[in-house]
Image (cartoon, rainbow, N blue to C red):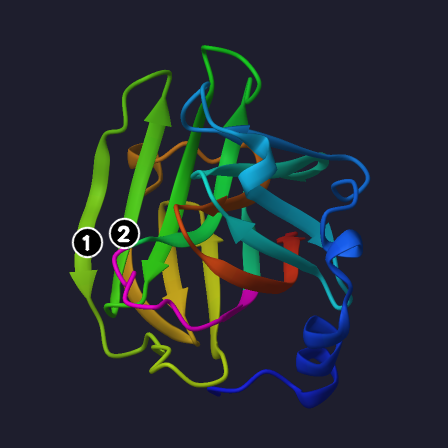
Amino acid sequence: MRKLVPLLALALLSTPLAAQESERPEGWKVRFDRASANPDNHKFVTMEPGWHVTTGPAGIMWNADRMARGQFRIESETHLFPTNGRNREGFGVLFGGQNLPDDSQSYTYFLIRNDGSFLVKRRIGTRTPTVVGWTQHSAIVRNTGEGTAKNILAVEAGTDEVAFYINGEKVTSVPRGDVQLDGVVGLRVNHGIDLHVSSLSVTHKTG
C-alpha cells in the first residue's frame, strides 16, 4: 500500500522539468484560494496513469465535463510523496461544484492529511462551514518519509445519507441535506504537497 508502482515512480523521476511545467491537462481549470497566488508555483500535469500535482498555493482543479448528480459514487486513488514535515496540509476530492470560477463558488470537499486525519467541509462563496472536523482514523496510510503512501477516497451519495470511505473503510456519514451534492467533481490540494492522482471516477447508481 505504501509504495507507488515501479513504472510510475520511474516515470516521475525521469520526466524533464520542461514537461512538468507544460500546459495543464486539457479541459481542466484551476482556482487558487487566494487571488494573489503565483500560478508558477503550482504544477498540474497529465502523467499516466492520471495527473501529478505539486503545490505551491492551495486550490481546486476540475473538468466541467466530470459531473455527479442524484445517487452516485466518487472514487479517487492518490499517492502522496514525502511531506518533509508538512503533515497538516489536506488533499482529496470535491463534489457538488457550482459556479467554480465565480465569487459565488460552492462545493463540498473530503480531504485527508498525513497526520492521519480526515475532514468534510463546504465552501459557499467566502465561507467554509465545517461538516465533520479534522478526525483521526487508522484507515489512512501515512507517508513515513520513503516512497509514496497510497490512499483511496470514496464518497457514496444514497437516498438519505452520504457516506465517506478511506481505503474501503467507512469513516463517517452525514444526511444528504448537510452537503452540496449535485455538480462538478474535482480535486482539492492544499499548500506544499507533492501528489500523484492515479484515478478520479464517478459512477451513477440506477434503479
Specify the farthest residue to the front.
17
Which mark is drawn over residue 73?
Answer: none
Separation of residues labelled 1 and 2 (CA atoms): 5 Å
Quadrant of res 123 = top left
**How many numbered discs sit on the rendered protein?**
2
Q: Looking at the picture, how far across and down is residue 182, in whole percent?
A: 53, 32
Residue position for label 2: 119
Residue range (magenta): 77-88
Q: Nearer the viewer, residue 191 or 19?
A: 19
As for residue 81 lying within the magenta part, the answer is yes
Q: Looking at the picture, how far across and down is residue 8, in whole percent?
A: 71, 78
Q: Quick check: 118 left or right of 189? A: left
Going by the numbered disc 2, the residue's amino acid type is Leu
Which mark is drawn over residue 134?
Answer: 1
As for residue 37 lying within the magenta part, the answer is no
Residue in view at x 45 percent, y 38 percent: 57
Binning the other alpha carbons within 10 Å of mark 1 as few (below 14), some (14 to 19) or many (20 upward) gives some
Binning the other alpha carbons within 10 Å of mark 2 as few (below 14), some (14 to 19) or many (20 upward) gives many
Which element is circle 1 on? strand
Vertical placement of residue 57 versus 73, above or below? above
Q: Looking at the picture, how far across and down is residue 104, in whole percent?
A: 45, 11
Residue in view at x 48 percent, y 49 percent: 93
Going by the numbered disc 1, the residue's amino acid type is Trp
Residue in view at x 54 percent, y 28 percent: 31
Vertical placement of residue 62 versus 114, above or below? above
Q: Could you tell me if the residues under marks 1 and 2 are in contact, i.e. CB atoms within 8 Å?
A: yes
